[in-house]
Image (tube, grey):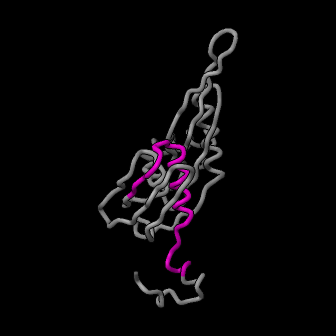
């Protein structure tokens, strides 16, 4: 078992990923440029990377082949990671995120609920380490904008301690809503 894990970590290190990071390929697009001899294809990849315990980021890479585009996206994603506060495998409170036409609502769920989400939002939640969450997306179904809207929502999350510190209160003095 550990042999397989070491091989996986070595593969991640070869691709430019740090050990312990999970990556999910959200979307691979094939683009075509029409030239004199026909069409020249290139590929664009959208990747979400996370450590499974509250760190997540996204990247977008373009290249003439699929593997280099995924590697570029992974490298960019590992540089753009944000911290997401987690409370018992879920998020601390309900939050809305938006990007362009995409609107995403993230709702905390009880233990055992699982990840109720579409493909793009699910990839972000899994990479982040969220186990129980309810989500709903409105507007577009474009995975690129849904990932960005989800990360916008996650960047707005705050814990009780952070909110109390912003208000200059003791965390025990906050009223449950």
Depth check: give the residue in front, 60 or 3: 60
At a point 32% along the width and 67% down the height, the residue shown is 110
Relative horizontal placement of residue 32, taking residue 114 as reference (left or right): right
Residue range corresponding to the magenta coloring: 135-163
Relative horizontal placement of residue 119, taking residue 47 as reference (left or right): left
Q: How many marks?
A: 0
Question: Which residue sits furthest top?
Answer: 37
Q: Is residue 44 magenta?
A: no
Question: Which residue sits furthest right?
Answer: 36
In x, y percent, where is residue 170?
53, 89
Q: In which quarter of the image is the C terminus?
A: bottom left
At a point 63% along the width and 11% down the height, the residue shown is 38
At a point 59% along the width and 29% down the height, the residue shown is 43
Q: In which quarter of the image is the N terminus?
A: top left
At a point 38% along the width and 59% down the height, the residue shown is 131
In x, y percent, where is residue 133?
38, 60
Vertical position of residue 167 compared to residue 149: above or below? below
In x, y percent, where is residue 37?
67, 9
Residue 135, image quadrant: bottom left
Vertical position of residue 79 compared to residue 33: above or below? below
Vertical position of residue 145 compared to residue 82: above or below? above
């Amino acid at each position: 078992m550990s042999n397989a894990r070491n091989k996986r970590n070595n593969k991640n290190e070869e691709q430019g990923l740090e050990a312990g990071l999970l990556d999910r390929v959200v979307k691979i697009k094939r683009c075509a440029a029409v030239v004199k001899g026909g069409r020249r294809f290139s590929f664009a990849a959208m990747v979400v990377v996370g450590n499974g315990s509250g760190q997540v980021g996204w990247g977008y890479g373009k290249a003439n082949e699929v593997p280099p585009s995924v590697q570029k996206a992974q490298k960019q994603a590992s540089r753009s990671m944000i911290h997401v506060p987690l409370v018992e495998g879920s998020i601390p409170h309900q939050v809305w995120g938006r990007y362009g036409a995409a609107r995403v609502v993230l709702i905390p769920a009880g233990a055992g609920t699982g990840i109720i989400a579409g493909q793009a939002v699910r990839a972000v939640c899994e990479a982040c380490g969220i186990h129980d969450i309810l989500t709903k997306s409105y507007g577009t179904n474009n995975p690129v904008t849904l990932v960005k809207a989800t990360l916008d929502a996650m960047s707005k999350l705050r814990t009780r301690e952070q909110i109390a510190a912003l208000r200059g209160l003791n965390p025990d003095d906050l009223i449950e809503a």
